[in-house]
Image (cartoon, helix red, strand yellow):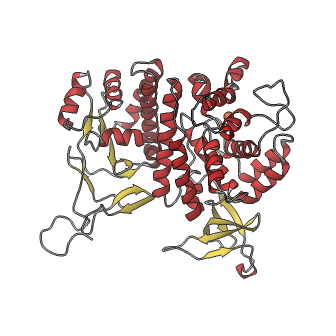
Amino acid sequence: VNTTSLERTAPARPAASPPEAGTLERVTNFVDELLVALVNAGIFWADHPRVRSSVDRLLQLLPGLTSQGPLQLASVEDCLLHEERPLLGASLSGSRLIKALRGRESGGLEFAATTTREDLRALIGLLGQRPDASESLASVNTRLQADGARWVRLLPPYRLAAGAGGTAAAGPAAPAPAVPRLRLHGRVYQEIVELLQGIAVKVCHGEAFGFDAAQTLLDRVLGLLERDPGALLQITRYERYDAFTFGHSIRVCVLAVNFARSLTTDPALLNRVGVSALLHDVGKARVPFQILHNTGRLSAEERLEMQKHPLFGAEILQDLRDSDPMAVAAAFGHHLTEDQAGYPRTFHEHRLSTVTRLCKVCDVYEALTAVRPYKRSMLPLEAYRVMLSMKDHFEPWLLRKFIQVNGIFPVGTVVELSDGRSARVRAQGAALDRPVVEVLAEGGGPLVDLGQPDAGGLSIARAAFGDPIPEGAWSAEAPPGAPA
Ligand SMILES: [Fe+2]
Ligand SMILES: [Fe+2]
């Protein structure tokens, strides 16, 4: 991504060498924590203990990020950047922050090394308020100061510098500057996170939420899967622990819809499956925060508390005016097993619906293959082995079909071919270990179906699972109206 033509109007920035990958990771953690604080301030209030614990964490992270000067986060288009590098994970889950800045005509945030608890408290309070379009950025910053902030401020908008050609008046027109933007599937992902954040806030306030927003988004997910199944599956492989487990819900949703496409072509049914999968863990919004985010071993009592989430979920969904029984059943039954075990305990015999079974397969697969701070992720093959050994948890035909649809090398996986070339899996093929791959080459390489005789015996030597940044999540586009 070419972001070198971006320049901040103020303050003047010294030419810095590009940040190391570790720095970007730490900045992403910082933004993640800021988002947790913003969502929790929306659920509770700016001085709630949960927000305070986020503020403490932010203050712990800051010294490592301000040794060279103030920490600056930029917001341009639908992306967050640090030192002109796009922050993918932060941008995907950060539309709440991006919109809060855009609504105030601001292009970013600045945190001095001397930032205090009071600064962060005032900033979180301000960003949580609805922006007033008539208020200038200067007066927003003045108000921030009046609220007690001295070492943080909102930055002015990014100004696009003349392109690589510089500002010379004579000579050929400079090329249009490039702006990093999320591609369509990234923007849809961003909107789903925002929807789930909004639902969590409403559930915690005991308010109802409408199904329609989820249904509308699911139609877009289906459209994207139809057009380019790899793109969305690929972005959902972006493996980050996110504080509210929204990433898990989105991945389960995309896996479920993609799986369901192999079983039905009915768009209304696919939409219902997607909404059911997206909201299967909605009951977690009622589980105490410290239990939900406990990365260690849960005590027996905590486990019981955690195991209430399917019941909470079913209650939340059942109380909605436009609720769907399919989603209620999936929320209630996704931890029940075929042999009448699991939770919540029921006194009567239960029989799981096909959609609940489907969500359960995707839920367990996601949990096994995802990265969590306390465990390594399993390779798909390892996950299948575990799932096949979990007798009575899954309907056998459904599990077999799921394995067939996802293959040993799921769509989006980067692999090394037997001739040493790198390739990316684009679709499943006739055999589980012989997908259709696109050879990675400058300008796009050929598509090879490894199951066909004309593949010349080419096979997969090894896979690079856990590829952290999916290729193609970003695009560098000229801004609308920029000279071509
Ligand atoms: Fe669950
Ligand atoms: Fe789940």
Ligand 1 sits in quadrant: top right
* 457 left or right of 31 in image: right
Q: Nearer the viewer, residue 215 or 241?
A: 215
The residue furthest left is 169
Q: Nearer the viewer, residue 222 or 469?
A: 222
- Please tell me whether residue 366 is drawn above or below residue 207 in the rendered image: below
Any part of residue 68 in sight: no
The image quarter containing residue 42 is top left
Q: Position of residue 159 (x, y in %)?
A: 23, 53
Q: Position of residue 289 (x, y in %)?
A: 56, 24
Q: Nearer the viewer, residue 22 or 220?
A: 220
Number of on-image labels = 0
What residue appears at the point 30 percent right and 43 percent down from the top-left corner? 102
Q: Position of residue 419 (x, y in %)?
A: 67, 74
What residue appears at the point 19 percent right and 75 percent down from the top-left corner? 172
* 133 left or right of 435 in image: left
Question: If the image is split into quadrants, where does the C terminus sit?
Answer: bottom left
Any part of residue 284 in sight: yes
What residue appears at the point 58 percent right and 59 percent down from the top-left corner? 225
